[in-house]
Image: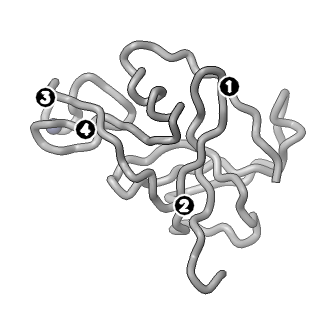
């Protein structure tokens, strides 16, 4: 396993709660107070009911692999880290997050596998990635 490169995010005021959470290994995402929809990507207006009463809430970070690909070629800082996994993880709360899966047995990785969040240092915050969740009894 190699540590994937990170890009230090441009943290702006409208997404500061997400990055503040990540800095302390917590996943914090917006949720509509009127219809309870989780809003991902972060926006000031709920995409379901158009309410602007959206608040940041901490979620478990647990989820499953919705889709993934294994990159065998890369450029720049990523070239030394192939193969690596690019994935959409569907959070238990519903949103699908574009991310990397780290620490996985690439031959055993499957859609639907449970994953848990890991946070990798990136400047003053951390970036969100996921790793396979441990399973009782092994694979
Ligand atoms: Zn709503």
Secondary structure of the residue carrying tag 2 is strand
Image coords of residue 125 (percent x, y): 57, 26
| Label 2 lies in ligand 1 vicinity (Cβ under 8 Å) | no
Instruction: Please tell me whether residue 31 is drawn above or below residue 16 in the rendered image.
Output: below
Dot 3 alpha-carbon crowd within 10 angstroms: few under 14, some 14 to 19, many 20 or more: some
Q: How crowded is mark 4: few (under 14 residues within 10 Å), some or many (20 or more)?
A: many
Residue 71 percent across, percent down from the top left: 76, 48
Residue shown at 45% from the left, 13% from the top = 12
Q: Distance between the residues labelled 3 and 2?
A: 31 Å
The label shown at residue 7 is: 1
Inter-mark Cα distance, 4 to 3: 11 Å
Badge 1 or badge 2: first in the primary sequence: 1
Q: Name the residue under label 2.
A: 115
- Color theme of the render: one colour
Rendering quarter of residue 52: top left
Q: Earlier in the sequence, mark 3 or mark 1?
A: 1
- Which residue is tagged 3? 51
Residue at the extreme bottom of the image, as rendered: 137
The secondary element bearing badge 1 is classed as loop
Q: Quadrant of residue 134?
A: bottom right
Whether 23 is drawn above or below 131: the answer is above
Q: How far apart are marks 3 and 1 (CA)?
A: 32 Å
Tag count in the figure? 4
Dot 4 falls on a residue whose secondary structure is strand
């Amino acid at each position: 396993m190699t540590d994937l490169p990170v890009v230090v995010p441009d943290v702006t005021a409208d997404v500061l709660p997400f990055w503040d959470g990540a800095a302390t290994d917590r996943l914090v995402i917006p949720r509509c107070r009127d219809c309870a929809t989780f809003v991902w990507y972060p926006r000031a207006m709920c995409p379901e009911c158009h309410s602007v009463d959206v608040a940041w809430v901490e979620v478990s970070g647990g989820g499953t692999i919705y889709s993934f690909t294994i990159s065998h070629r890369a450029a720049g800082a990523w070239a030394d880290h192939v193969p690596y996994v690019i994935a959409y993880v569907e959070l238990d709360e519903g949103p699908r997050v574009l991310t990397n899966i780290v620490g996985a047995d690439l031959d055993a990785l499957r859609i639907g596998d449970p994953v848990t969040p890991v946070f990798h240092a990136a400047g003053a915050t951390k970036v969100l990635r996921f790793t396979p969740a441990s399973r009782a009894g092994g694979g």
